[in-house]
Image (cartoon, helix red, strand yellow):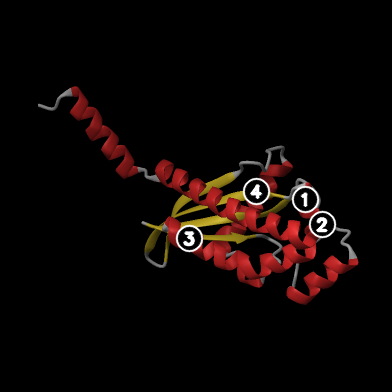
Amino acid sequence: MKTPALLLLSCLSFSLWASPAPLLEAEARHAVQALAGRLQEEMHAALNTGGAQAAIASCNAQALPLTEQISREQGLIIRRTALRVRNPANNPDPWETRVLESFVARQQVGQPLKGMSFSELVEENGQRYFRMLQAIPTQNQCLECHGSELAPEIEAKLNQLYPNDRARGFSAGDLRGAFSIRRLL
């Protein structure tokens, strides 16, 4: 006969096995914080040393390598995506598109973007994955490079580095994009 403590441990083990989502969500949120923190550090350092043009160049050169590094460190596949991307390498897949569109719909009915996320267990190509998207709201400081009215030198730098840029014309509070996390189960 199992003791109450052993029975409880047995139930907890079963529930964790049956639904790993809470643990996976915590792991994904930690990874998002790590990536967001590193990207912000890089962006602020570039802004402080060379202004917005330097920040654009730094983002162009550093964002993808930093994302890959954090992915390796965290043991997850992490990326940034959006409905309107600056870098075509960040185009959303069908699952991400569906979730991003749901974020827009949720915001339109009054839900705040800050902290908005969605996760689920999915099957893709015969494999099970945990997937999560964490919304990135457009902040006031983002508008210098993502807003409607860009300084000529900013526009020129963006045109040079991102000829297919669609990540302009945002207002503060708009859905800028999302962090996307995927983990093979």
Q: CA distance from mark 2 to mark 3?
A: 28 Å
| Of the image marks 3 and 4, the number of the one nearer the N terminus | 3
Closest to the observer, 163 or 112: 163
The disc label shown at residue 103, or none: 4
Instruction: Categorize mark 3 by other alpha carbons within 10 Å: few (<14), some (14-19), many (20+).
Output: many
As measured in the structure, the alpha-carbon distance from the residue carrying label 1 to the one carrying label 4 is 21 Å
* Residue beneath disc 3: 71
Report if the CB atoms under discs 3 and 4 are less than 8 Å apart.
no
**Residue 51 screen position, x and y as percent:** 79, 60
* Residue linked to disc 2: 144
175 relative position to 78: left or right:
right
Q: Which residue is mark 1?
A: 141
Q: Nearer the viewer, mark 1 or mark 4?
A: 1
Farthest residue to the left: give it: 1
Instruction: Determine the CA span between mark 2 and mark 4.
Output: 24 Å
Measured from the top left, where is residue 37 in percent x and y?
59, 51
